[in-house]
Image (spheres, coloured by chain):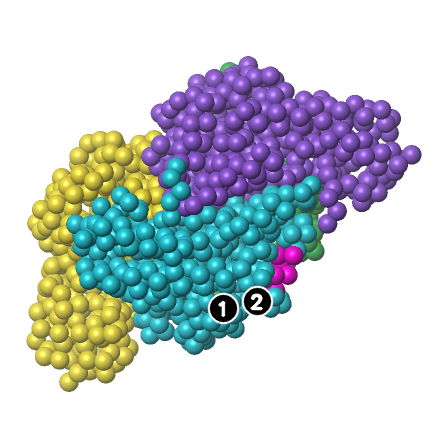
Chain colours: A purple, B cyan, C green, D yellow
């Protein structure tokens, strides 16, 4: 296999060397399984350093599970979850949310993946009506599926609205690091301190091999499953309890140490800016979203798509308008971008 | 953390160096996500080498998922699954089978974890009765939770009975390698060729970091979900689709190359035999199961339990009779056993 | 309690005298439970008279169950169901479809409750993509929630499209009788003969006390559960198997004999026309939907709503535009309408 | 159809004339749907008269739903429910408990259908262990499936044990009336006052056409769904909300007025005693259970079974020992028993 660099997705990248090193170093002797090991304890400490005390963090194998089980912990089967129509939990989990939580997703239209209190309000009808699923969660993605970023105040407004109505705020943070880097804020600023109740904290798209975390910020607020008491059963039942947990823990220890999470995210964001700059120089291409994190969305004349894809595979995000998505990652280099742009230019000529 | 060797479980061991090497070597450049990579193609080939053509193999994160989703693919929600009372799917999945498949587990009593056609027959009542869950699957564990092994003919009898009654045979092969090593047979001999329809093929307890596989041996036989067409959606929905699949694939390529799976299993089995031999020399201890694979079950006078556990943590398998379970693993050394026996002798004196 | 006649819903009406008589007459001696009785056999015959041979009919307690279990029988948990945004299965089953089938509802916007092939087409994307729920069913309501009627050809087009794409057509026929009466067609014309695969056949809104039927028209077409073999277990598991089935059967025998279903539906439709005529004479009111069956949708100036509701309770269908829904029923009389109109006029003056 | 009287089941009987009368009388004019009617309010009052204030009662269509949704309201998906192996919820709900609640049923062996605290204790292991479903409910049947009766003190012991361990006591009261009649106690004595938390209150086997009730006795005790706030959504989602609720309510009003429930149950019990007496006179037959309520269990030589069944259909309860179950009901007459005994004697000669 040719060692290539793709712009198809940030999960086409591999494992960051520091993280692979952490895995290798954890491979010594035996360790108790299922989280009763020193690595997992240390990882819990790292989470506390970043998010504060009195939280409950649970590792999941992937982002689907982090979203689904996090939502399951805070809903009843007769609830609904309000989110953007293009939210990953709506478009890309193959009904996992529905089958695991029972909840209906109430979607609001969004071009940039962000939603507002005004949009949420429109879904708040028939409260108390037994025929209708009852809204319980607002779920937002940070950074969004379109690479856009919620400001702290925007999150706070949604959280306040949710809490005022007995609801909770869930954040799909598959790319939380990129958002924090873009805003130049701490992880805690745009999650716990902005009122988020439950976070899917992503690692895989930021240099980890496999692993995400659900973090519950509040042990009291109306969860259907106690995060500190009942959730471990949900994790096991949800087929997300790993026996050799030390290897996920070691990865997160590395990611959350020495600002590795931030360096990786900043670099990916920076590369996206560079890619944007180069694309803007090509008049046939049209950038459709403000580039705030590590995604660049571009309308490319339809006739060029297949030719470019043959050189650099990528996804058409919106086929109807021939819009492509390019993602940069912690390991994208200036040379990668140069080569990619060359390939595009070579095709378009 | 002290680098110790535990006999508590074969999942307390780490990753075999060859497998860690394979992970490290796979960490080059980018690869398409979700299985569209060359490693996964190569892993599929390896499965074919061991199990033959026309199979469908899917990676899962852990054994719970391999069992649960494999069973989901071959059942309807109104079916029942016949298994031993001490089967892992009954005792240790925290209802994951029930919630995901809807099926009821019909258990038959078993001291060694094995079940027979005669026992299965007793569960075959009220067929066609709408009030009663209809038996659809016989699920066996190879090697069993008690370290015991089904002979090929024993499996064949269960498979024949199942197929004669329109049912299927599922095998939880978390320790299949140990069973094959004990029987001196190929993996295929005691699975596909013995009539098994669906296999959970374990890797984690045999030197892998994280990963198991579901293998469907028969594309035609009355699955509720087509293994070659529909199962990919079940995997995704079951929160088991990993983005960076190359890392699981690379591990299985290594495990299934150069007989690594066999060497690891043989070694673990051999160490169990050695441990057995040493334990039999201690008159206060009583071995309760024939040692066929990598588990040694021992009744230890109750007063010694805590003292030994403080030095070498282990699980009481059956508290009511003070029966402990000791597991050996690919990395257990003769010295480890020597030290462990010393610790026991030092306690018992 | 004052004996009043409401226009709030056609399920505010009672039981038609002929149907109550049938119940009373069935109350003789003993009958085998769970459908092994002569009444149920006779009801099956009636269904065959109306819909033809080689069908499978199952009684349910209510319309929710008829919709949900009918859909469950023809879907896998990774499928999606395409329907109108205002379809009852989407708005008014409190997630029963989602939790029981696992399926996501893909909605298309509709003012009159009808959907078209063009709208369905827009939902047919990402076929074969493992991250995305796969469309399997088009579900339509006849008559729609807005009292509108699909013509036979319109249904046929949707059925043809569905079948061409390996999908099935489900019809929520809670008010099928009203639609057939409006079109002056037989029940079979706009269901089986128009290509419908699975029908929820409503009785409650047409004079029955309690009871609906699921009718499967095709035993071969890709159901996930065999309608003639597996569905009885789904019914039991779905908590819809009634022990004293003769009482539901007797009701349906009466409904389907001597054109009672048609007389009831025709009368209700006729009363709606009369109500429409009277409402059109009141300049402050504005009819919003063509009156084709037994529903009349009317925008009423907001200030009058509460006053009228105090005399005749009704539902605001669309609060944002102050649109009320008035339903007529088999027992609505011209005098009832006269009195109702008087009450409205008295309020508006 | 010949008007015959069966001893196969108490649900082969019809509707008691008083109850049919109540239905007929409720068939006047319109009534608001879904429980907002005066009949349902009155039925609630009746429940309060029998069980006291501060309860929450919900109608279900059948006993399966009453058991399943009652259990769903008080469990999480990672719980287990301890019950007798022959409990109806284990043997005869076609996995409805499992699929709806996710819970595993932990069964204890029972000849008479009753279970004891000592038996429950043996299931109380691995508490707090994430791999294992956590016991949450003890479910008992009163009268049991074998016609046996728990004394008040026996229930109290189970309730005390449950509450001491943070668990709840559920009672399947499909034949509660027969038990109360047998014990000469009030309904409340052996339910709420004995510590029962949730009751399935049966009507169908005691003269009702169709309908059961779930009664929650305690609004505070650790339900997973608030009985007074959340349960209405569970009912709707569970496909158990009837639109024309007045007809179920009217039946329960009649059943709970003028001691009709008691008269019916007493009569059925008395007829069982008579049947027992007559059977004991036939030396070839052997009664296997003390006759306490309305069931008589009898071992009949295998060669007579089919011959008797042809005249009076009944179920073989335990085929392996040729044990039949005969049920009496509110409408069984002395003459019916005389004829039945004649038929048996005629066969045995």
Give the residue drawn at x 49%, y 34%.
A213
Please report, as a chain letter, where disc 2 is located.
Answer: B
- Which badge, 1 or 2, comes first in the chain's sequence? 2
Q: Residue C123 or B121: which is nearer the viewer?
A: B121
Give the residue drawn at x 61%, y 21%.
A181
Going by the picture, which residue comes out furthest to the bottom?
D349
The secondary structure making up most of the magenta span is helix
Q: Are marks 1 and 2 on the same chain?
A: yes
Is residue C346 positioned above or below C338 on the image? Answer: above
Q: Residue A38 or C127: which is nearer the viewer?
A: A38
Residue at the spot of label 2: B51
Label 2, residues with CA under 10 Å away: few <14, some 14-19, many ≥20: some
Q: Residue B345 or A187: which is nearer the viewer?
A: B345
Is residue B74 positioned above or below D287 on the image? Answer: above
Numbered mark located on residue B191 in the image: 1
Q: Residue B300 or A213: which is nearer the viewer?
A: B300
Q: In the image, residue A217 lies at what x, y percent?
A: 42, 25
Q: Is residue C10 left or right of residue D161?
A: right
> What element does badge 2 sit on?
helix
Which contiguous range is marked in magenta? Answer: B42-48
Give the residue drawn at x 43%, y 77%.
B153
> What element does badge 1 sit on?
loop
For the residues labelled 1 and 2, the Cα–Cα distance comes to 8 Å
A206 in the magenta segment? no
The answer to whether residue D90 of the structure is visible from this angle is yes
């Amino acid at each position: 296999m040719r060692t290539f660099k793709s712009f198809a997705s940030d999960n086409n990248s591999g494992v960051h060397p520091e993280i692979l090193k952490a895995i290798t170093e954890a491979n010594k002797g035996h360790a108790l399984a299922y989280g009763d090991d020193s690595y997992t304890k240390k990882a819990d400490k790292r989470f506390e350093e970043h998010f504060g005390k009195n939280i409950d963090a649970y590792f999941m194998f992937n982002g689907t599970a982090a979203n689904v089980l996090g939502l399951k912990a805070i809903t009843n089967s007769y609830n609904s979850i309000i989110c953007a129509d293009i939210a990953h939990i709506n478009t890309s989990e193959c009904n996992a949310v529905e089958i695991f939580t029972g909840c209906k997703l109430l979607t609001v239209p969004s071009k940039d993946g962000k939603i507002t209190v005004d949009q949420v309000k429109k879904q708040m009808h028939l409260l108390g009506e037994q025929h209708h699923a009852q809204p319980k969660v607002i779920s937002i993605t940070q950074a969004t599926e379109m690479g856009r970023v919620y400001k702290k105040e925007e999150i706070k407004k949604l959280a306040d609205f949710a809490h005022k109505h007995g609801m909770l705020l869930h954040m799909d943070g598959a790319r939380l690091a990129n958002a924090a880097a873009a805003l130049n804020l701490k992880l805690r600023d745009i999650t716990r301190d902005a009122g988020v109740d439950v976070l899917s904290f992503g690692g895989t798209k930021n240099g980890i091999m496999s692993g995400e975390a659900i973090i519950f910020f509040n042990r009291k607020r109306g969860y259907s499953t106690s995060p500190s008491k009942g959730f471990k059963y949900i994790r096991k039942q949800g087929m997300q309890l790993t026996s050799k947990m030390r290897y996920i823990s070691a990865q997160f220890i590395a990611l959350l140490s020495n600002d590795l999470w931030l360096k990786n995210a900043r670099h990916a964001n920076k590369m996206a800016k560079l890619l944007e700059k180069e694309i803007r120089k090509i008049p046939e291409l049209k950038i459709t979203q403000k580039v705030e994190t590590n995604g660049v969305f571009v309308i490319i004349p339809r006739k060029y798509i297949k030719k470019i894809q043959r050189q650099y595979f990528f996804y058409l995000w919106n086929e109807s308008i021939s819009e492509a998505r390019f993602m940069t990652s912690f390991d994208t280099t200036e040379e990668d971008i140069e080569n990619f742009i060359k390939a595009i230019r070579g095709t378009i000529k």
